[in-house]
Image: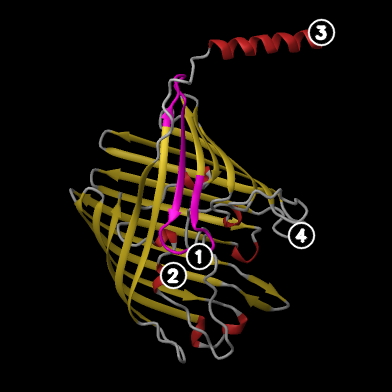
C-alpha cells in the first residue's frame, strides 16, 4: 500500500508540474543600482579629560550602494535579489546585506543575510535628522578615560537596547536566516525568522557545542488608517533555542512600538529589552513627536538606554546608562534630496567600580549638526 501511495503522489506531482505555466517566457533578472548617501558636518562641545579634547568640528558620513532586481514568472511568483555594498570602508562588513526574495499571493520569503521579521516589522518614532535610534549620537559624544585607563563602555550601542529599539537576540543583526511574511490582512501582518546560527557571510557548518544556534524571531504589526488618523503598533520577540552551555543559554529579546498620525502630526513610543544576554542585558525607551507640512518637517525625540553590565566578586563592569534628546528638522530640496539638521544633547553615566569617584563616570556633550541625505 505504501508503494502505491508513493507512486500516486509522484504521478500527481508530475501532473502539477506539467500543467503549471511555463517560466521560460519570464525575463531574466536585471539589476538596478540604488542606495543612499548621508554627509554630516557639525560641532560638539563635550566633557574632556587629561590629554583628551573631543570638542570641535567634524564631518561624518554613511553611504551604501544597493544592487536590486526582480522578475515575475508566468505563474505570478516574483523572484528577486538585494545586495547592499557599504560605500565607506568597513573591514568587518563590506557587504551589509545580501539575500534572495520570493513573493506572491502567499506572502514573501527572504533567504540570506538580512534583518529578521522582529527587526523589520518594528515601529518607532520618526526622526528627521541624524538617528538616535541607530546610535548616531555615540559618534558625536565620546567617553573619556581616567588615570587608571577605564572609561564608560559604549559597546553594544548599535542593535542593543542601550542605543536602539530595533533589536534581535544577541545583536545578531544580518545573520544568515530564513524569513516568511504573511500577506497583510485587515491591517495585520505576521513575520517569522529562523537563523541557524548568529554568524553573517559564513558557509561553515556551525558547531552547536561551541556556538549559540537556532534562533527563532517573530514580529507582528498592525497598520491601518481610519479616516484621517493612522494607527500602527508592533510586537517582536526572539530567543536562542540552543545556547552554549552556561553562557546565554536562553538569550531573548523583546520590542514593541506604537504610533499615531493625525494629518501632518505624528507621535510614537517604542521599547526594547534583552534578557540572559550577558553584559548587554538591559532596556531602552524611545519617544517622540513630529510634524510635516509639504517639504518641511520637524521632530523632537528622546531615548533612554541601559546596559546592566556584570558584577563579579563585588566588581562591576560594562554598566552604562545613556540619555539623548534631539530636535531635528528637514527640508526636501528635490526628489531624493533632503537637507537636514539636528541639535542634540547626550549624557553617559556608569556605576563601574573602576570609574567610581572620577570624572570619567559621567560624560555629556551638546552638538549641532547639519547635512544632506541623498537617495538614488
The residue positioned 29% from the left and 64% from the top of the image is 327
For numbered disc 4, what is the local secondary structure?
A: loop
Please give the residue where the numbered disc 3 appears in the rendered image: 1
For numbered disc 3, what is the local secondary structure?
A: loop
The residue positioned 59% from the left and 52% from the top of the image is 200
Q: Is residue 216 above or below residue 28?
A: below
User: In which quadrant will I find the N terminus?
Assistant: top right
The residue positioned 33% from the left and 69% from the top of the image is 344
Residue 370 locus on image (x, y percent): 26, 67
Please give the residue where the numbered disc 1 appears in the rendered image: 157
Please give the residue where the numbered disc 4 appears in the rendered image: 246
Label drawn at residue 138: 2
Q: Are marks 1 and 2 in contact (CB under 8 Å)?
A: yes
Q: CA distance from mark 4 to mark 1?
A: 25 Å
For numbered disc 2, what is the local secondary structure?
A: helix
Q: Are marks 2 and 4 in contact (CB under 8 Å)?
A: no
Is residue 345 inside the magenta stretch? no
For numbered disc 1, what is the local secondary structure?
A: loop
Mark 2 surroundings: few (<14), some (14-19) or many (≥20) residues within 10 A: many
The scheme the figure's colours follow is: secondary structure
Q: Which residues are magenta?
A: 71-98
Amino acid at each position: 500500500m505504501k508503494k502505491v501511495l508513493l507512486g500516486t503522489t509522484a504521478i500527481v506531482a508530475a501532473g502539477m508540474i506539467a500543467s503549471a505555466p511555463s517560466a521560460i517566457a519570464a525575463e531574466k533578472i536585471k539589476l538596478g543600482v540604488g542606495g543612499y548617501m548621508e554627509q554630516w558636518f557639525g560641532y560638539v562641545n563635550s566633557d574632556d579629560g587629561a590629554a583628551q579634547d573631543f570638542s570641535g568640528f567634524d564631518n561624518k558620513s554613511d553611504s551604501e550602494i544597493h544592487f536590486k532586481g526582480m522578475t515575475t514568472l508566468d505563474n505570478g511568483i516574483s523572484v528577486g535579489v538585494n545586495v547592499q555594498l557599504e560605500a565607506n570602508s568597513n573591514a568587518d562588513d563590506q557587504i551589509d546585506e545580501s539575500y534572495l526574495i520570493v513573493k506572491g499571493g502567499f506572502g514573501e520569503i527572504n533567504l540570506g543575510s538580512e534583518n529578521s521579521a522582529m527587526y523589520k516589522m518594528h515601529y518607532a518614532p520618526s526622526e528627521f535628522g541624524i538617528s538616535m535610534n541607530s546610535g548616531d549620537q555615540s559618534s558625536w559624544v565620546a567617553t573619556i578615560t581616567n588615570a587608571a585607563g577605564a572609561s564608560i563602555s559604549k559597546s553594544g550601542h548599535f542593535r542593543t537596547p542601550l542605543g536602539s529599539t530595533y533589536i534581535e537576540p544577541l545583536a545578531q543583526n544580518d545573520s544568515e536566516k530564513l524569513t516568511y511574511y504573511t500577506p497583510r490582512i485587515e491591517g495585520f501582518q505576521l513575520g517569522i525568522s529562523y537563523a541557524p546560527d548568529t554568524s553573517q557571510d559564513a558557509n561553515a557548518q556551525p558547531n552547536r557545542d561551541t556556538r549559540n544556534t537556532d534562533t527563532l524571531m517573530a514580529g507582528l504589526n498592525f497598520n491601518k488608517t481610519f479616516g484621517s488618523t493612522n494607527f500602527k503598533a508592533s510586537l517582536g520577540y526572539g530567543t536562542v533555542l540552543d545556547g552554549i552551555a552556561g553562557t546565554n543559554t536562553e538569550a531573548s529579546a523583546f520590542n514593541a512600538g506604537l504610533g499615531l498620525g493625525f494629518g501632518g502630526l505624528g507621535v510614537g513610543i517604542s521599547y526594547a529589552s534583552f534578557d540572559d544576554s550577558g553584559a548587554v542585558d538591559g532596556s531602552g525607551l524611545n519617544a517622540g513627536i513630529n510634524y510635516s507640512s509639504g517639504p518641511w518637517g520637524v521632530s523632537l525625540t528622546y531615548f533612554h538606554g541601559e546596559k546592566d553590565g556584570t558584577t563579579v566578586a563585588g566588581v562591576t563592569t560594562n554598566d552604562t546608562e545613556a540619555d539623548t534628546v534631539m530636535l531635528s528638522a528637514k527640508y526636501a530640496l528635490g526628489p531624493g534630496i533632503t537637507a537636514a539638521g539636528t541639535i542634540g544633547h547626550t549624557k553617559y553615566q556608569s556605576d563601574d567600580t573602576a570609574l567610581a569617584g572620577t570624572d570619567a563616570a559621567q560624560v555629556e556633550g551638546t552638538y549641532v549638526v547639519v547635512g544632506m541625505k541623498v537617495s538614488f
